[in-house]
Image (tube, rainbow, N blue to C red):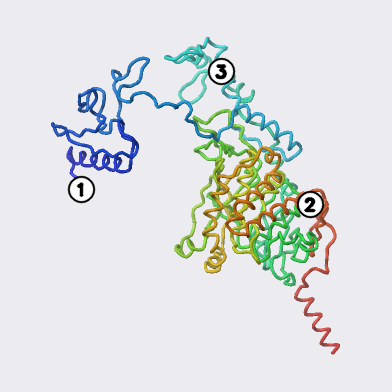
Amino acid sequence: DQRFVVGPGAEMRLIVVSATLLGARGAFLPGTSVGEHKEPRSSEHGELTTPHTKEHGKEHKGGGGHTGSILGLGHHSSSSYHKGGHHHGYGKPPEGLERARRPGIIPSAEKVAQDSKNFAARHQGSIPAIPTETTTPQVPELFRGALRERGKIDEAATDYLPAEKATRALEAEVGWDGERFDKDPSVVEGLRSMGGLSTSGVSAAAVLGNLPKYMDVVIPSIRDLDFLNEWRQFLEGFHLILVQDGDPDKYLAIPDWADYELYNRRDVEAALGDRSWIISQRDASVRNFGFLVSRKKLVYTVDDDCRPAVGPDGQLVNVLVEHARNLLSPSTPYFFNTVYDPFRDGSDFVRGYPYSLRAGVATAVSHGLWLHNYDYDAPTQLLKVDERNERYVDATVTVPKGVLYPLCSMNVAFDRELIGPAFMQGLMGTGQPWARYDDMWAGWASKVVADHLGLGSKTGHPYIKHNKASNPFTNLMKEYKGLEWQEDVTRFLDTVQLSQAAARDAGTAYIELSWRVHETLGKLNPYFQRLGLAMRTWVEVWREAQQGQVKFVPSRRGSQATGAHAGPVAHDRAARPPDARSATSRALRASV
């Protein structure tokens, strides 16, 4: 009925539709089984009733025990309840109710505390965390102690507020005018200094001001890198690890101010020998080699069609600093905070967030987003040709435990010490049956490992501006198998269970995952057996590289490279600049 008349008639028509739809969808109507549909009906007085409104042979007509809910789910008067018994309309609880329990996400408070101690022991000497004034797990006990000092509290109370008198005494002592303390705030300030707010770690300025010491930048490219000039104010002083894809004889122009080392395919093969096949060709996942080369704790990687974004304040966003803030402050994977990242300035945990979880866990991945061109797949590109993102949402969230997400490597940073061996971009490109899922694989697999190790992954702020949307038809060709396989792969990764032995570190977990990929996804296509082997080989090479057993020698190095970034250069493997090739050609013509 599309007629809407102001008055009881219109209200009644809407209620009938709602009840019918709920019943038709198999809603659980009291007194019926799930899925059983019973139509609402009219009583002899014309009022709507449901099977539940007849109790003990008597109809309730909007009064007494029920107050206006035709589904029998409304409020009940106190007369409907019996002390020590069950509501007469709902019967007894089903048998086995106490055993009905699903696997949980939230760890015990004891396990959270132990994991925190284990983590601190394993990563002693790493970059200190950035302090944030965030409420801590100590808050409840601090306030309980303060209240117990001011009055007796009956912890077994069931029908009154046990801390009322003690709280009133505290309020009288401190004073409260409706907005702030107006007497003696020293008690509450003392609770803050006793551990109510987290202030551990060195200052943010001390860490972020010296960020090049802790972070490398990895960039894959097939073209001149003049785009770096638009990043100069942020990248100058950082060490750049450039990985050239495609023709190693193509000379790439690089700004003189850049501190860089460049590796081409010949350099990859010289370093890895017969294991160089794990580094993809003609695919952005060639950046994997840069991850192997780096020796810094943090790595940021960006694509050559990306530029700094303008933030909500009208200023260019320094993504390196903002990614570092994300990585050096905790994540909250066990419980979602509805005002996003509680560790950002001006934020905290909201009411109802368990205090035992407020210390958070170490952050392994910081995934940034994009203005202008979204990271869409080919079909979405083709169906939404003109869609652009012009909205910068200045928020960061932790991806919850047990939830996978699509990661795009054109604006992402990660902690090599925590997740590096499990952050391999998937084997794609030349000789492989799919492409453009290399970073998806890295995101899915690293999230499985991070969850298993008790680490966090963040997504959102900071943004970059993604200037160039790639050819959707080329993308469709590359993604064809992925549109089908992603359904199987994500469901496999969603349910795979790693062993406790694999919780030792990211490399061990990734090796175990590789065997699960081999055995399970290998039945989908033999490619996944090859991928599993690549995963194990990657961890082997990673571990050797960390021990200095793999020699990385670039074919080019910037003139700004100093200290640890200076070193030998394999000039014989380098592409010659255009002027050098021209000089050689002129000399040959002259000799003829």
Report the amino acid beneath label 2: Ala
The label number, if any, that marks residue 502 in the structure image: none
Q: Residues within 10 Å of mark 2 (few under 14, many from 20)?
A: some
Q: Which residue is mark 2?
A: 545
Residue identified by numbered label 3: 144
**Disc 2/disc 3 C-alpha distance (Å):** 51 Å
The percent coordinates of residue 464 (x first, y second) are 58, 55
Camera sees residue 188: yes
Do callouts 3 and 1 mark residues in contact (Cβ within 8 Å)? Answer: no
Left/right of residue 156 with respect to residue 559 in the rendered view: left
Residue 177 vs 464, above or below: the answer is: above
Residue at horizontal 52%, vertical 54%? 487
**Residue at image location 61% in from the left, 24% down from the top:** 138
Can you tell which mark lies on residue 1? 1
Give me the C-alpha separation between circle 3 and circle 1: 58 Å
Residue at the (60%, 22%) spot, across then down: 191
Give the structural element (helix, strand or loop) at label 2: helix
Instruction: Locate residue 461, reporting x and y percent.
Output: 57, 48
User: Which of these two is toward me, 149 or 552?
Assistant: 552
- For badge 3, the amino acid type reads Arg
Q: Is residue 512 above or below residue 289?
A: above
Q: Is residue 78 left or right of residue 175?
A: left
Q: Position of residue 92 (x, y in %)?
A: 36, 23
Give the mark toward the camera: 2 or 3.
Answer: 2
Q: Quadrant of the C terminus?
A: bottom right
Residue at horizontal 70 percent and vertical 41 percent from the top: 505
Q: Position of residue 74 (x, y in %)?
A: 30, 29
Q: Reading the chain from its start, which is encountered first: label 3 or label 1?
A: 1
